[in-house]
Amino acid sequence: PLDMRMDPGYGQSAAQWLASAASDEIARVLFRYGEERHARRIARAIVEQRALAPLLETADLVRVVEQAVPRRERNKHKATRTFQAIRIFINAELEQLELFLNHCLEWLAPGGRLAVISFHSLEDRMVKRFMRNKASGDKVPAHVPVRDEQLNRKMRILSRAIRASEEEVAANPRARSAVLRVAEKL
């Protein structure tokens, strides 16, 4: 079934949303959350298809996307970005990540480590900015003399972004897009 909810008892399924959403809304979701270049074309194809028959199975949506979009990168299926976008939207994943990041320092003890694995650029961008902002401390104009300890830094970044090795990706293809970032609470 075309559901995509993390909690099947909460909110509407992907099939329900796709059955009622306007073409513009679908295109906006695909572009914003999937960074899909062909968002409008896919959205129009979805609306046209659902007028003929409802999209109830994942295979139904895959067929629509495959027909609407020219061939993609070698290692990525054409529908990957579409499914990602709809899943992120249905589950409010970026809003949940933001909520977590806003509260995680309350839950960590000094010296505690925050390790976050993200699987796409939208998540990774949020995590990277959060860690960088907490590690840089208060914003002070360049000409103001301030000692380092007065900047009120909250975290220390422990390493650069860590990506899966070629061996890991060969053993676990889902690790292809994974990025691990680690920081320590000060």
Image (tube, rainbow, N blue to C red):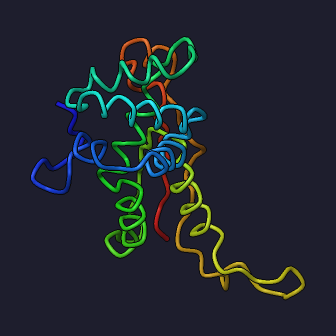
Q: Is residue 124 above or below residue 137?
A: above
* Quarter assignment of residue 56: top left
Q: Residue 125 in the image: state x and y as whole percent.
A: 57, 51
Asked whether 181 or 156 is in front, the reply is: 181
Q: Residue 172 in the image: state x and y as whole percent.
A: 36, 18
Report the side of 112 relative to 4 (left or right).
Answer: right
Q: Residue 89 in the image: state x and y as whole percent.
A: 37, 51
Residue found at the far left of this picture: 9
- Which residue is found at the position 9% from the left and 53% from the top? 9
Report the side of 140 relative to 35 (left or right).
Answer: right
Q: Residue 122 in the image: state x and y as whole percent.
A: 52, 48
Number of disc labels: 0
* Quarter assignment of residue 61: top left
Asked whether 18 or 142 is in front, the reply is: 18
- Which residue is found at the position 61% from the left and 61% from the top? 132
- Which residue is found at the position 54% from the left and 42% from the top? 121
Report the side of 1 relative to 147 (left or right).
Answer: left
* Image quarter in which the N terminus is found: top left
Report the side of 103 relative to 154 (left or right).
Answer: left
Residue found at the far right of this picture: 143
Asked whether 21 or 84 is in front, the reply is: 21
Asked whether 3 or 182 is in front, the reply is: 3
Residue found at the far front of this picture: 52
